[in-house]
Amino acid sequence: MENKRIIMGSDHAGYNLKLKVKAHLEARGFEVADVGTHTPESCNYTIYADALCKAIAAGEADLGILVCGTGIGMSMAANKHRGIRAACCENTFSARMTRMHNNANVLCLGERVVGPGLANKLVDAFLNAEFEALIKGKYKAQYDARMQDTIQKRLKSSKETVDKFNALSPTLEMLAKKYGVDATDIESLNKAIQEDES
Ligand code: RB5
């Protein structure tokens, strides 16, 4: 499991917990990427949820961990992305089961909800579990059928749909347009939003 590539992201409200969880994972031997935010300044959580999901969709990481104040906003933003199954968990049973039964690939945590000790346990439960269909075949038929359906739909989809799928998330695109910055330049975008809001 330690060879899984982990990516983390947070807003200001999840910044401190993210650093603690990151240190815990690195001590466990994981390689952990961080899409930001890199300061405790107030920022928009959707930017970091979008950046993390795009990295996973691009195959740059296997599993993601997003932290905000409650974990809820992050999970809502992440679940708008195709191929992302994000779960906001506050107990280790759910954190384990969401990998095993839902094949969740993003765990969302709330720094204002769980302390660092529990957060590390939640992350361990999530990372130590595997999707059951892959290990026991319990839901394999169901999973394969769903996969076939997805593949067929993708094959049928027009280039326009594929382009849309690959495009930046509406939130990110909209904000980048509004502030006249490059949507891939997360730090400049964040700065522009902060300047506008101050
Ligand atoms: C930021 O104050 C807070 O609203 C955010 O971190 C998150 O909890 C949203 O769901």
Image: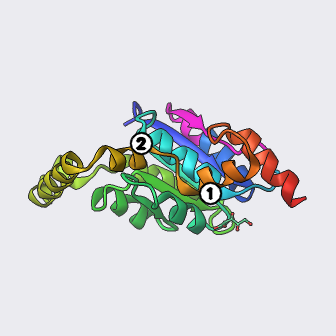
The kind of residue on which mark 2 rests is Ala
The alpha-carbon separation of the residues under discs 2 and 1 comes to 16 Å
Q: Which residue is mark 2?
A: 57
Q: Secondary structure at mark 2?
A: helix
Residue 64, image x, y percentages: 49, 46
Taking the image as shown, residue 90 lies to the left or right of residue 57, namely right
Q: Is mark 2 within 8 Å of ligand 1?
A: no
Does residue 107 sit above or below 32 in this rendering? below
Residue 55, image x, y percentages: 49, 39
Q: Secondary structure at mark 1?
A: helix
**Residue at the farthest right position:** 198
Residue depicted at 40% across the width and 66% down the height: 94
Q: Nearer the viewer, residue 62 or 159?
A: 159
The kind of residue on which mark 1 rests is Thr
In the drawing, what numbered circle is on residue 20?
none
Do tag 2 and tag 1 residues touch (Cβ < 8 Å)?
no
Callout 1: 10 Å neighbours few (<14), some, many (20+)? Answer: many
In reply to whether residue 30 is colored magenta, the answer given is yes
**Residue at the farthest left position:** 141
Q: Which residue is mark 1?
A: 46
Residue 88, image x, y percentages: 50, 65
Residue 165 in view here: yes
Residue 91, image x, y percentages: 48, 67
Residue depicted at 22% across the width and 54% down the height: 132
- Quadrant where the N terminus lies? top left
Span of residues in magenta: 24-39
Q: Nearer the viewer, residue 58 or 13?
A: 58
Rendering quadrant holding ligand 1 = bottom right
Q: Of label 2 and label 1, which has the lower sequence position?
A: 1
In reply to whether residue 9 is colored magenta, the answer given is no
